[in-house]
Amino acid sequence: MITAARKTRRTTVLTIAGLLAGTALTGCGGETPAPASPSPPPPPAAASTSPIPKKPPTMAPGPAGRTPVFERRTTGGGGGAGSGAAEKVVALTFDADMTADQGPRAASGERFDNPELVALLRRLKVPSTVFMTGRWAEEYPAQAKAIGADPLFEVANHSYSHHAFSSPCYGLPVVAKNAMTHDVERAFTAFRKAGVRNVVPYFRFPGGCYDDTALRALAPANVTAVQWDVVSGDAFATDADAVARQVLDGVRPGSLVVMHCTRSAAPATEAAVRRIVPELRERGYRFVKVSELMEDGA
């Protein structure tokens, strides 16, 4: 670039930036000479190729506005037009459980997280949905934020307190009907405070326990309840092979598997996943998040 000129001499500077913008820029007091040959007009600006964030699919409310419930994909999905073949996809979901009153246990050293499992899912490149309680996000905010920032995962709501929304439910304390929506919203608030991204509007009932009253009470939360069709049996299990067999025996195209992401309550899960993932891939299955499973199955 020329930075100075004699006063008796006028210089025209055609900058590279001006060419890219399609505009000739002249030096102080100068005139733009006619080019030796006309330059072609610049091409029109290309449309932005940045992907627009996709809104997670949800189900329409049930009768009388009840919260809808999704359990598995029931359509053929990607089997091809007219083929009737079900696409071999499966969603592995992991409940990050921590009940509201378990803080003292965590303080004494009990681990309700499972970073080794999360690291394994990353190494194996397994898209997954983590159903997280608000209390878990408060106890492990750095882990919650990291999971939510990883495009491999999506974070769904598993309540704040991990109390039951119907009774009986595995001995869990029960949430009052008029407090159910608040409990769900409190979990979403905990996610925001921890900096969790990739949050989807899905909710899993603690223990999987719900009734018509709960479905009506949760309607204002505008979530889709997500259950499952394959129970891994990993809760409190110590035999990883037994957990793996149960999953492998139960999976079919469109299945949704429930597992856990808590070392204290599900110590065999990581070892079971080491067997489950390669075996299902060998059978031709592709792993997806719940949001993808729901796209064609809602």
Image: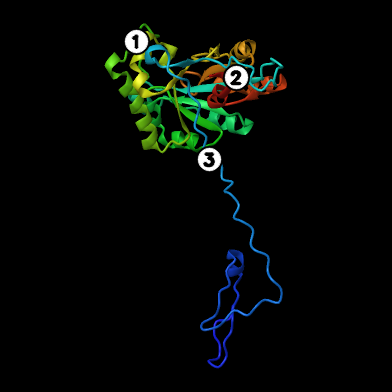
- Residue beneath label 3, please? 52
Where is residue 201 drawn, in percent x and y? 44, 27
- Of badges 2 and 3, nearer the viewer stands 3
Q: Residue 2, which numbered label?
A: none
- In the image, residue 24 lies at what x, y percent? 58, 72
Could you say whether the residue bearing mark 1 is in a helix, strand or loop?
helix
Towards the viewer: 233 or 131: 131
Tell me which residue sits at (48%, 24%) in the image.
Answer: 58
Sooner in the amino-acid sequence: mark 1 or mark 3: 3
Going from N to C along the chain, the mark reached first, 1 or 2, is 1
Q: Is residue 105 visible?
A: no
Above-or-below relation of 179 to 40: above
In percent of the image, x 36 and y 18: which residue is there? 218
Amino acid at dot 2? Ala
Q: Are marks 1 and 2 in contact (CB under 8 Å)?
A: no
* Residue 162 drawn at (x, y percent): 37, 19
Q: Of the residues tagged 1 and 2, which is closer to the observer? A: 1
| First of labels 2, 3 by sequence position | 3
Mark 2, residue position = 272
Whether pointer 2 and pointer 3 mark residues with C-beta atoms closer than 8 Å, the reply is: no
Task: Name the amino acid, label 3.
Answer: Ile
Residue at position x 34%, y 10% in the image: 213
- The three-letter amino acid code for the residue at tag 1 is Thr
Residue on which disc 1 sits: 213
Closer to the camera in the image, 31 or 228:
31
Residue 229 location, quadrant? top right
Mark 1: give few (<14), some (14-19) or many (20+) Cα within 10 Å: few
